[in-house]
Image (cartoon, grey):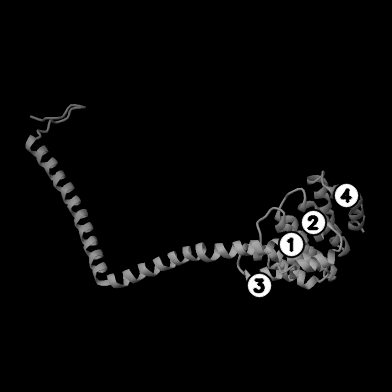
């Protein structure tokens, strides 16, 4: 007699409970085996590390010792050499700064700038600070003072030399140093160089004091070099971005001049 399976009919399969237990047991064995392999690998790695350390401990201790000496030496240098050196530099720089400030605001400027540079009354000048305390923040700042003093004394090459040795992140001093180099190059009739420094000074900070001042100077030099389009850009920035600045007072005149020259 022919037999057939009805639609949807599934033949029952007898599953032995013992088989299920065996499968679970096998899984446990596999898990335990994997864990064991991991621990064996870790043991082997640890053993190799121990062997390496045992064989090379002399060199490892030497390296550790060198690192410790460098770190401790650096800390000691900062604490017992750099800090006292900087304090001495600041104390010895006080009189030179006083001469410089008096030169900026008072009469007999040339003699006061010379005193700021070379010292007076038995005190150090900026040049002494640069020489005696090289590498300190005071020596760095002394380069700014010395460069500016030389600029006022019309020794433009020395002004550039010292101002280029000055570095700062200060909001005002950093662009002033670059701008002063530009002023020196103008006096040396190296106007392309001057324009580059004025542009750099204007870009360094976006404050309402140095940015419009050096945009104005850059624009004036650009006009002189026949770069009216560039000058117009700088003058329009002053008008649009720094309308409250001193340079903005007559900026329309410069904009008009730049427009006329740009359209020729």
Dot 4 crowding, Cα within 10 Å, few <14, some 14–19, many 20+: some
Question: Where in the figure is residue 44, as x and y percent of width and height?
Answer: 21, 61
Q: Residue at x 81, y 59 (%)?
A: 104
Helix, strand or loop at mark 3: helix
Residue closer to the observer: 253 or 9: 253
Measure the alpha-carbon separation of dots 3 and 2. 31 Å
Q: Quadrant of the C terminus?
A: bottom right
Label 1 sits on residue:
178
* Dots 2, 1 in contact, CB < 8 A: yes
Label 3 sits on residue:
131
Measure the alpha-carbon separation of dots 4 and 3. 44 Å
Question: Where in the figure is residue 101, as x and y percent of width and height?
Answer: 77, 58
Measure the alpha-carbon separation of dots 2 and 1. 10 Å
Q: Residue at x 47, y 64 (%)?
A: 76
Image side of residue 192 versus residue 94, left or right: right
Label 2 sits on residue:
214
Label 4 sits on residue:
251
Residue 230 in view, yes or no: no
Which of the two labelled residues, at mark 1 and mark 3, occupies the earlier sequence position? 3
Residue 68 in view, yes or no: yes
Image side of residue 185 versus residue 206, left or right: right
Which of the two labelled residues, at mark 3 and mark 2, occupies the earlier sequence position? 3
Which of the two labelled residues, at mark 4 and mark 2, occupies the earlier sequence position? 2
Of badges 1 and 4, the one in the foreground is 1
Please determine whether, in this image, residue 7 is positioned above or below residue 200.
above
Q: Quadrant of the N terminus?
A: top left
Please determine whether, in this image, residue 217 is positioned above or below residue 249.
below
Question: Where in the figure is residue 90, as x and y percent of width and height?
Answer: 64, 61
Residue closer to the observer: 151 or 199: 151
Question: Where in the figure is residue 120, as x and y percent of width and height?
Answer: 75, 68
Task: State the image quarter where residue 189 is shown.
Answer: bottom right
């Amino acid at each position: 007699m022919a037999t057939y399976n009805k639609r949807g009919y599934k033949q029952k399969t007898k599953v032995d409970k013992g088989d299920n237990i065996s499968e679970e047991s096998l899984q446990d064995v596999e898990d335990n085996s994997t864990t064991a392999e991991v621990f064996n690998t870790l043991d082997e790695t640890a053993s190799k590390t121990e062997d390496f350390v045992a064989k090379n401990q002399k060199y490892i201790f030497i390296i550790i010792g060198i690192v410790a000496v460098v770190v401790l030496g650096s800390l000691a240098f900062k604490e017992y050499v750099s800090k006292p050196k900087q304090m001495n530099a600041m104390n010895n720089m006080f009189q030179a700064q006083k001469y410089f400030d008096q030169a900026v605001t008072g009469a007999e400027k040339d003699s006061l700038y010379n005193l700021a540079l070379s010292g007076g009354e038995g005190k150090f000048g900026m040049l002494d600070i640069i020489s005696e305390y090289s590498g300190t923040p005071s020596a760095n700042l002394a380069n700014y003072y010395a460069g500016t003093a030389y600029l006022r004394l019309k020794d433009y090459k020395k002004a550039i030399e010292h101002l280029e040795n000055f570095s700062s992140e200060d909001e005002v001093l950093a662009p002033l140093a670059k701008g002063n180099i530009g002023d020196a190059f103008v006096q040396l009739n190296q106007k392309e160089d001057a324009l580059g420094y004025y542009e750099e000074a204007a870009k360094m900070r976006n404050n309402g004091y140095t940015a419009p001042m050096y945009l104005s100077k850059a624009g004036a030099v650009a006009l002189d070099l026949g770069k009216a389009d560039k000058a117009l850009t700088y003058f329009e920035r002053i008008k649009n971005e720094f309308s409250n600045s001193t340079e903005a007072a007559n900026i329309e005149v410069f904009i008009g001049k730049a427009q006329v020259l740009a359209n020729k």
